[in-house]
Image (spheres, rainbow, N blue to C red):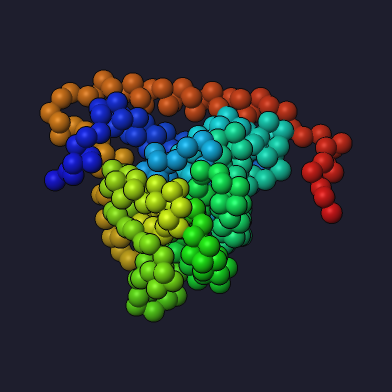
Amino acid sequence: MSSKYQRNLLETELFSIYAQLLRIRRIEESIAIKYLEWEMRCPVHLSIGQEAIPVGISTHLNTEDHVYSNHRSHGHYFAKGGSLKRMIAELYGKDAGCCGGRGGSMHLIDLEVGFIGSTPIVGGTVPLAVGDAWSAKLKGDERVSVIYFGDGCFEEGVLHESMNFAILHKLPVIFICENNGYSVYTQLNERQPNRKIIDIAKAHGMDTHTAEGNDVLSIMEVSCGAIEQARNGNGPQFFEFQTYRWLEHCGPDDDDHLNYRPQGELSTWKERCPIEKLKNYITTKGLDYEAKFQSIESEIEIEISEAFAYAKNSKTPTIDQLENHIYA
């Protein structure tokens, strides 16, 4: 049964959310296909299956709000409004890329929309987000910092140090744990005692929240008021969302044959696809929206095709640019 919050969403809002989810999925699928041409210059960590969290969170963010991410950053980047053309160009190592072709998939940035950056170092962007939030508070800026991380990062000391500092100074920072149950190939129960991540955050003194990690509407609902709490000076907020990555940790392929996942687990999670979940909710309203769904699909296909053409036709950096942006 839908909540009052969900029932109050307009039809246009629902289709906009659906389009964002589908757009991220189709971009990631296209990257997986094109990656096999061996023209991209970097490893990729695809977010297929995890699209609902960044889309749900970003519905409550402004352009001025700052987002920090990790190695699996594509969904976060696109949900915040990052340029598709520049991101694809980055994967191809082109000068038109969002990092000038220097960073690749794990080093994305789009300052125009407030996506401050991602890094492959586990926990590396956490203290940056907290420091940014401290700066915002000292300056009196009405913006929040958002930091995405996985369950593996929760085992890093820097995260707990950062949480402590954020609570102590009541900083406007949003901690978002995308718990997909694995750190590369190792399950959570092989790395941590039988305890909930959200309970540890609560023990730090953090305001904590959770919802179904593949239900974008539930994520929107639970995060709406919490993000405003942080924005209004009431301190940091912590979210844990259970979700699941469909593909291998790093790369474009399915890896279920490696047998590190329990048999049937992947198929069970695919049945909880966040895109199909929202599509089913929309269609329960009893109207025939198939033409609208097809229109969204076609628009996304055209945009992706244009982005890959742009990337492939862009120039590669020249040798005289090699020492640009080097500060040591």
The location of residue 96, given as percent across then percent down, is 68, 31
Would residue 93 be seen by someone viewing this image from the given angle?
Answer: no
- Lateral position of residue 207 relative to residue 88, left or right: left
- Lateral position of residue 297 relative to residue 125, left or right: left
Which one is nearer the viewer's eye here, 216 or 64?
A: 64
Residue drawn at (18%, 41%) of the image? 4
Q: Quadrant of residue 104?
A: top right
- Rendered view: 82 above or below 157: above
Which one is nearer the viewer's eye here, 56 or 320?
A: 56
Residue drawn at (68%, 40%) of the image? 99
Residue drawn at (72%, 33%) of the image? 95
The location of residue 286, given as percent across then percent down, is 12, 28
The location of residue 12, given as percent across then percent down, is 29, 26
Q: Identify the residue at the far right of this view.
A: 320
Q: Quadrant of residue 7?
A: top left
Would residue 139 be seen by someone viewing this image from the given angle?
Answer: yes
> Which quadrant would the C terminus be assigned to in this image?
bottom right
- Rendered view: 195 above or below 88: below
- Rendered view: 210 above or below 143: below
- Rendered view: 230 above or below 157: above
Residue drawn at (15%, 34%) of the image? 284
- Lateral position of residue 130 relative to residue 180, left or right: right
Which one is nearer the viewer's eye here, 253 or 231?
A: 231
